[in-house]
Image (cartoon, rainbow, N blue to C red):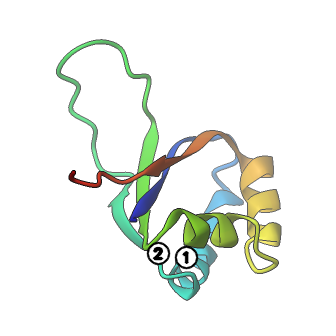
């Protein structure tokens, strides 16, 4: 079943963050992922979401999403993101019709 990595990212170090942004797409693709939303403009309709850089990445499965996130290829990028942002990140399982 499809799974998604959903993140809200607030950049705290705009000088170093572009290095993360430039390198991460290749690693995501290596694990079968693709961006569905990559920091597009958010147009609030109801309530306070508090979104900054909103990102949705689709993976073919939850296992693939976890493999990406915990991979040796992503580890140095995760460290860089942790040093240059405040982030909230979750995995979300996709909808499976009955």
Residue farthest to the front?
A: 98
Where's residue 37, x and y in %?
A: 33, 57
Give me the residue at 75% from left, 61% from top. 78
On-image quarter of the N terminus: bottom left
For the residues labelled 1 and 2, say whether their Cβ atoms are less than 8 Å apart.
yes
Q: Regarding mark 2 in the picture, which secondary structure is present there? A: loop
Viewer-proximal residue, 36 or 67? 67
Q: Regarding mark 1 in the picture, which secondary structure is present there? A: helix
Q: Is residue 85 above or below residue 81?
A: above
Give me the residue at 55% from left, 76% from top. 28
Mark 2 neighbour class, 10 Å CA radius: few under 14, some 14 to 19, many 20 or more: many
**Left or right: 43 as drawn, with respect to 48:** left
Sequence-wise, which precedes: disc 1 or disc 2?
1
Give me the residue at 65% from left, 58% from top. 17
Q: Which residue is label 1 attached to?
A: 28
Viewer-proximal residue, 92 or 23? 92
Where's residue 35, x and y in %?
A: 39, 67
Quarter holding residue 72: bottom right
Q: How far apart are the alpha carbons under marks 1 and 2?
A: 5 Å
**Left or right: 68 as drawn, with respect to 70:** left
Q: Is residue 20 above or below residue 32?
A: above
Give me the residue at 48% from left, 82% from top. 32
Where's residue 84, x and y in %?
A: 73, 49
Mark 1 neighbour class, 10 Å CA radius: few under 14, some 14 to 19, many 20 or more: many
Viewer-proximal residue, 75 or 23? 75
Where's residue 20, x and y in %?
A: 65, 67
**Left or right: 85 as drawn, with respect to 36:** right
Q: Which mark is residue 68?
A: none
Q: Is residue 28 above or below residue 56?
A: below
Residue farthest to the top?
A: 47
Q: Which residue is label 2 attached to?
A: 33
């Amino acid at each position: 079943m499809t799974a998604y990595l959903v993140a809200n990212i607030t950049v705290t170090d705009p000088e170093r963050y572009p290095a993360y942004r430039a390198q991460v797409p290749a690693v995501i693709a290596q694990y079968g992922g693709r961006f569905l939303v990559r920091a597009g403009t958010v147009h609030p309709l109801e309530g306070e979401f508090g979104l900054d850089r909103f990102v949705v990445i689709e993976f073919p499965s939850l296992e693939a999403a976890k493999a990406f996130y915990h991979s040796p290829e992503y580890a140095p990028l995760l460290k860089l993101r942790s040093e240059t942002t405040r982030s909230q990140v979750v995995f979300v399982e996709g909808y499976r019709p009955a």
